[in-house]
Amino acid sequence: MDQEKQNSTILTLKKVGKTYDNTVHALQDVNISVEEGEFVSVIGPSGAGKSTLLRCINRLVDATEGEILFDGRDITHVTGKDLRWVRTRTGMIFQHYNLVNRLSVIENVLHGRLGHKSTLSGVVGYYTEAEKEQAFEILDRLGLADQAYKRCDELSGGQMQRVGIARALMQEPRLILCDEPIASLDPSSARVIMDYLKAINETMRITCILNLHQVDVALKYSERVIGITAGCVVYDGLTENLDKKKIHEIYQSEEGQLIIDVDEGGK
């Protein structure tokens, strides 16, 4: 193996479980290791636990059982400054963007630096010239430099998602988590977003984990796919080994009844 291709483990989940209200088992005995620089797609039916998985990783929700190790640290129960450390190094991209619509594009992007600032600097909105230059460089990379001073509610869905990506990059993250990043987009915009995410992964070596409904997209962009059914990992392996039979098992569907058709490009 080439030296530059040798990776280190950036994320490990050991027997992770999440139970809501002592009755709903959203995740059960999840064991996953992710190497630095990987681009991993997580697939499975609605309600399978995909979103809960990402929220446990960045500690938006607390795992009920098990351990989560990120960048060499046990983050399962961290609080305060240690939790802030996790959040600043983990970018999150949401299906519905989570932008402040009344603010400009550049202001939303600069919000990605808030986790690195004191409370006072965050409240008054103080950003250094270097941070502003960085924000414009990122927007230029994402083809949005000319939209910098527009309000976010004036943008298309694809543009808004690119702002979300830019905001995540401003954090200078080690890991980017994407929760259904293209579910609200038309096919053309979805392709643009996936191309940008893949380019960021390859050129910046930022590890990416994406929840996707579109099986065909997962197959196209990822070398590794994780399949989740009823909170359990039922497949974790190379994309090339994920055949139609296994996909039907993940989605618990009969042959010929899978709602996401691999050949037709998952509508």
Image (cartoon, grey):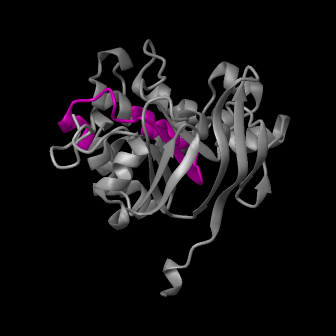
Q: Please tell me which residue lies in front, 200 or 136.
A: 200
**Highlighted range, magenta:** 163-191
Q: In screen coordinates, is 17 left or right of 32?
A: right
Res 117 quadrant in image: top right
Res 245 quadrant in image: bottom left
Q: In screen coordinates, is 227 left or right of 129?
A: left
Q: Residue furthest left?
A: 264
Q: Please tell me which residue lies in front, 127 or 194.
A: 194
Q: Magenta segment: does it hold 189?
A: yes
Image coordinates of residue 12 in percent, x first then y, are: 68, 57
Res 157 quadrant in image: top left
Q: Magenta segment: does it hold 168?
A: yes
The residue at the point 63 percent across, 71 percent down is 8
Q: In screen coordinates, is 203 left or right of 60?
A: left
Image coordinates of residue 261 in percent, x first then y, are: 22, 42
Whether 38 is drawn above or below 15: the answer is below
How many numbered marks are there?
Answer: 0
Name the image quarter holding the C terminus: top left
Image coordinates of residue 1 in percent, x first then y, are: 49, 87
Q: Please tell me which residue lies in front, 122 or 26.
A: 26
Q: Residue furthest top?
A: 102
Q: Note whether residue 82 is visible.
A: yes
Q: Please tell me which residue lies in front, 169 or 44.
A: 44
The residue at the point 78 percent across, 41 percent down is 65
